[in-house]
Amino acid sequence: MIENLKIEHIHSEAGKYVTVSIGICDNATLSTPNEIITDSNTALQQAKTEGRNRLICLHHNEEPNPS
């Protein structure tokens, strides 16, 4: 995990070290770029809500699920 690198985030009030939360969409059958962006953003928001150092993969037409 990125946090294990102990990269200090000196200007952050959220935490001492840099962390990464990622949201992705894994279904190539989506018809538009906007659908891919929307689903990826939904997954990212879930990752942020659940805490630091998260990867959430959204399967099209399903609820977000942890990877």
Image: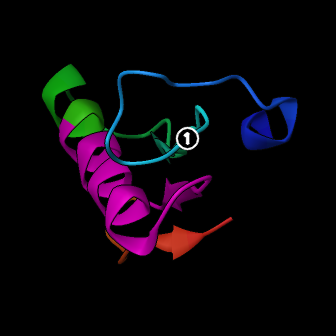
Compared with residue 46, is residue 54 higher up or lower down, i.e. above or below?
above
Q: How many labels, in total?
A: 1
Disc 1 residue type (three-letter): Lys
Compared with residue 53, is residue 64 higher up or lower down, i.e. above or below?
below
Query: Which residue: 69% across, 64% down?
Result: 67
Query: Which residue: 71% across, 23% down?
Result: 7
Query: Which residue: 58% across, 31% down?
Result: 18
Q: Position of residue 12 (x, y in %)?
A: 36, 32
Horizontally, residue 1 falls left or right of residue 25, namely right
- The magenta-colored residue range is 38-59
Compared with residue 60, is residue 28 higher up or lower down, i.e. above or below?
above
Residue 45 covered by magenta stretch: yes
Residue 31 in view = no
Compared with residue 11, is residue 57 higher up or lower down, i.e. above or below?
below
> Helix, strand, or loop for circle 1?
loop
Residue 23 covered by magenta stretch: no
Residue 50 in view = yes
Q: Position of residue 10 (x, y in %)?
A: 47, 22
Mark 1, residue position? 16
Q: Position of residue 51 (x, y in %)?
A: 47, 66
